[in-house]
Image (spheres, rainbow, N blue to C red):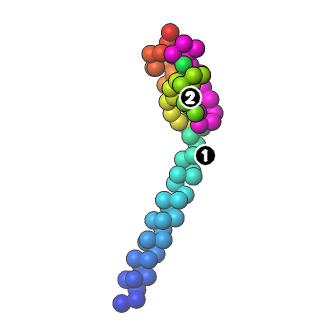
Amino acid sequence: MRKPVAVVLGCLAGTVAAAWIAPARTADTARFWVVGSFTRGCWIVESNPIIDGGTIQFSDGPYRSKDDAELARSSIRVCKT
């Protein structure tokens, strides 16, 4: 009867480890955000933006590459004007 308990505990430990590792890996690869203001246009930043309602009024992302962020920026209506 001890083997099934060990298997269950091993699976549980693996699941917990994966839950901790996966967000850390995602955070390393997702580094670009499209941010903007309705009056000042849009730009791409490499850190998680703080939307303050003044300089930055909206954000979109994160994106894994700058090319992905630029593609997203081209599809945001406010950024096109």
Residue that mark 1 sits on? 28
Secondary element under disc 2, as helix, strand or loop, is loop
Residue 19: image x %, image y %? 48, 59
- Count residues near mark 2 (Cα–Cα under 10 Å), then give few for <14, some for 14-19, many for 20+: few
Q: Residue at x 44, y 77 (%)?
A: 9
Q: Is residue 39 magenta?
A: yes
78 vs 34: above or below: above
Residue that mark 2 sits on? 52
**In this rendering, does residue 69 appear at all?**
no
Amino acid type at circle 1 is Asp
**What stretch of residues is rendered in magenta?**
38-49
Q: Residue at x 49, y 30 (%)?
A: 60
Nearer the observer: mark 1 or 2; the answer is: 2
Residue 52: image x %, image y %? 56, 28
Q: Residue at x 55, y 30 (%)?
A: 51
Amino acid type at circle 2 is Asp
50 vs 78: above or below: below
- Count residues near mark 1 (Cα–Cα under 10 Å), then give few for <14, some for 14-19, many for 20+: few
Secondary element under disc 1, as helix, strand or loop, is helix
In the displayed structure, does residue 52 sit left or right of residue 2?
right
- Numbered mark located on residue 41 in the image: none
Looking at the picture, tell me which residue is in the foreground, 40 or 64.
Answer: 40
Q: Residue at x 63, y 36 (%)?
A: 47
Q: Is residue 16 magenta?
A: no
In the orientation shown, which residue stands out farthest toward the bottom? 1
